[in-house]
Image (cartoon, rainbow, N blue to C red):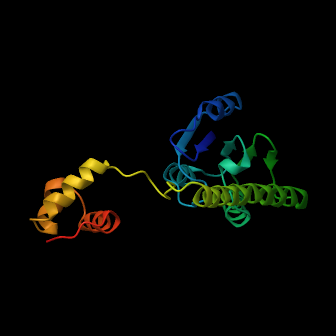
Amino acid sequence: MKYGYARVSTNEQDLANQLEQLKNAGAEKIYSEKYTGTKRDRPKLDELLSILSEGDELIVAKLDRLSRSVQQGTELISELQEKDVVVNILNMGRIDRTPNGSLMLNMFLAFAQFERDMIVQRTQEGREYQRQHNPNYRDGRKPKKTTQQIKEILDYLRVHTYTETARLFELDKSTIVRYKQRYGQNKK
């Protein structure tokens, strides 16, 4: 049986193009997910890998949808080849067990890892630039509470315990401690 696997890294990205490519390549059943490619354990990929057996074909649009590192990709494809599963990377072709196939696989995996490393480097450089040039820049997610809501939480904390405050506002105590440290209000 021919199985397809499609993946994007974030919820904002679209799977439609990959899904269409996999259908056009003859995939009879497609597993897809929105999950980072840097992790080896991905729920839908793990599910698919558990059912693949001798004679099946795994189709992916591009190698980096399957793996972003040389080590991870080599291990994964070697496991599939040991089970006699055909691996078909649409922009490369079928990966076989010949020396040429092994060389091509390792070269393409090296480029996938290089691309991932460059993305990380550019992201870090962008953050560093923002830290140096934007006084309002903060790393991480945006706060879930507005400044006004945080003020209300800290006002309540002045006459109540952390436990009571956390329960009422449905927050962790550590979040309230961070708010108190960041906004400088002291409990009386």
The quarter of the picture where the N terminus appears is top right
**Does any portion of residue 188 appear in the rendered image?**
yes
Determine whether 119 is above or below 175 in the image: above
| Picture coordinates of residue 148, whole percent (x, y) | 26, 48
Determine whether 23 is above or below 113 in the image: above
**Does any portion of residue 1 appear in the rendered image?**
no
Q: Relative to the observer, which residue lies in front, 105 or 181?
A: 181
Which residue appears at 69% of the width and 28% of the height?
24
| Picture coordinates of residue 81, whole percent (x, y) | 72, 58
Q: Is residue 171 left or right of residue 108?
A: left
Which residue appears at 53% of the width and 60% of the height?
41
Which residue appears at 75% of the width and 44% of the height?
89
Q: Give the quarter of the image for residue 62.
A: top right
Q: Relative to the observer, which residue lies in front, 37 or 97?
A: 37
Q: Give the quarter of the image for residue 83.
A: bottom right
Which residue appears at 11% of the width and 63% of the height?
164
The quarter of the picture where the C terminus appears is bottom left
| Picture coordinates of residue 68, whole percent (x, y) | 68, 57
| Picture coordinates of residue 77, whole percent (x, y) | 70, 58
Determine whether 10 is above or below 108 in the image: above
Determine whether 174 is above or below 17 in the image: below
Q: Is residue 91 left or right of residue 187?
A: right
Q: Relative to the observer, which residue lies in front, 29 or 135?
A: 135
Q: Relative to the observer, which residue lies in front, 104 or 130?
A: 130
Q: Is residue 76 left or right of residue 182?
A: right
